[in-house]
Amino acid sequence: MQSSEKRKAVVYQVFTRLFGNTNSTNKPWGTIEENGVGKFADFTDEALTEIKDLGVTHIWYTGVPHHAVIRDYTEYGISNDDPDVVKGRAGSPYAVKDYYNVNPDLALDPANRLQEFKDLVERSHRAGLNVLIDIVPNHVARHYKGLNNPEGVSDFGAQDDTTLVYHVNNNFYYLPGERFRVPQWEGGYLPLGGEKIDPADGKFEEYPAKWTGNGSRLAQPNFNDWYETVKVNYGVRPDGTKDFAELPQDYAQKDHAEHHEFWKDKKIPDSWIKFKDIALYWLDFGVDGFRFDMAEMVPVEFWSYMNSSIKMKNPDAFLLAEVYNPSLYREYIHKGKMDYLYDKVELYDSIKHIMKGYGWTDHIPVVQKGMADIEHHMLHFLENHDEQRIASPDFAGNAELAKPAMVVSATISTSPTMIYFGQEVGEPGAENAGFGHPTRTSIFDYIGVPHHQRWVNDKKFDGGQLSDQEKNLRDFYKRLLNFTIQSDALMGDYEEIHFYNKAHTENYDHRVLAYVRWGADEKLVIVSNWEKDKTYALELKIPEEIVQKWNLKDGTYTMTEQLYNEVQVEMKVEGEVGKIDLNLEPLESLILRLK
């Protein structure tokens, strides 16, 4: 598929509170004073330049909107949050308590926190980076309290009729006559690890009780429910029927302007308007796009309304959504007007199995074929804040195993690539942070990120404390990502040559993967070895169909490897079949370019 975009996008997801923290105490359940916290100001011009130079086009600052935290900011007019309905000490970034402000933990001066974030947005733009932040439309913190709402904007739930389970313009669902009760803690868990501070008393005042964020209708949600959040009502009745207009099927083929026009004369539920206003507020602030949390839990019609409003204001806004049900992908892309969805259930899961040693590369071309009509919209990643770190023993146990996976993830389609801060230096996520569990870098606690801190190097951002292996890994990511954002072929056509080579090439098997990419200015053969202890000596073949599409005649062609530019190989075309003699070292990938 030829994309309208000229070059690939690369998203750098950074957990904002962790990025600049140089404290290495890492006490479980530690306070800010004990474990430290990163600030907006830590993203200096030098840091942002280094991120940009890694080959990044967009930076997703995770955890920016003001969410519930266990720290006393009452002197700034901020209400304290109750540990009984906050996960961790630093709080979940997905339990937002004020959408028109930012996390006070991240500011040098909490009273000036909004300006400090605006300064960061401006620094990011100067560095050539587009800025993304989270919007979490499915749920908000149990104690939502806006402090500087724009004129005419009321808090979520402030005008609800709480005597009703449901009303189309209520922001929440209610359990009239029932009080909220804190979950029964399980597995030895206690809020704050058992520390007794007011108001950690096993109670939280909420009357009447509201439905919980994941849809639980219990006044006392389960420990495994999203008990720290409440479900937002989008005009979907408790029986699942809808209290709003549904999009005609042909709107899957219409553009955002036509979607925007569709909603102009319709009755719009209040929650829709509130979230649309939030998005437009942040666009005015200078933000360039959003990552939408758990988008499939919110009706696709809302997304049509929301995203068409965003695109009318900024047609270039970057809209990325978390959707895990493949049967919904096309609906949320075409009807919901999403630019990109996570490609987790198909590509990520397949790659993870191969990295762990028991998956076959045969599955990857099958996934790509199934995604052919929407491949540009399926963002690729190997890590994010929800997933295990590659270097964790529970995943691959070795960051080097990401090399062939990363090459494939970043080059097999026209979709954007995303990496998670610390991935490029092999961060293993080994810390016992408190609420968070090792294998994932905690998003709930104040913690330091050791491998990443070695790159931060006391805020020089020069990698001065990295080992040689870590430096080489980061160099690999830098070479790969910069190649992807400059390549014409990666926004062009794709064809797998894997099964042809399995049938016709000696020594080629299900731990090797090969495919071709091409555009107007370059032709690429990409081949990767996923084995960590095996070298493949083989004569890779380019089938007749590709030779004809590339207009190659019988003869010898020189190809240059693009990651390190140290290898030149010859492709001999005989009888309309190309042949390339290769020696693939363990975990080696070659991106061979034919001009």
Image (cartoon, helix red, strand yellow):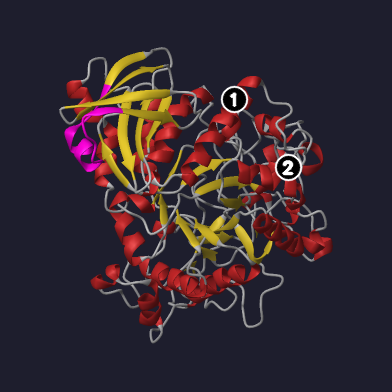
Q: Depth check: 535 or 391 in front?
A: 535
Q: Is residue 232 above or below residue 427?
A: below
The residue tagged 2 is 20
**Number of other residues with Cα within 10 Å of mark 2, as a class: few under 14, some 14 to 19, many 20 or more:** many
Q: What residue type is labelled 1?
A: Asn
Q: Depth check: 543 or 571 in front?
A: 571
The residue tagged 1 is 472
Q: Residue at coordinates 35% horizontally, 72% vertically from top-left? A: 255
Say which element carries label 1.
Answer: helix
User: Is any atom of residue 564 visible in this view?
Assistant: yes
The magenta stretch spans residue 553: yes
Apparent side of residue 322 relative to residue 549 in the rendered image (left or right): right
**Number of other residues with Cα within 10 Å of mark 1, as a class: few under 14, some 14 to 19, many 20 or more:** some
The boundaries of the magenta stretch are 540-556
The magenta stretch spans residue 160: no
Q: In which quarter of the image is residue 244?
A: bottom left
Q: In this view, does 538 lie above or below 555?
A: above
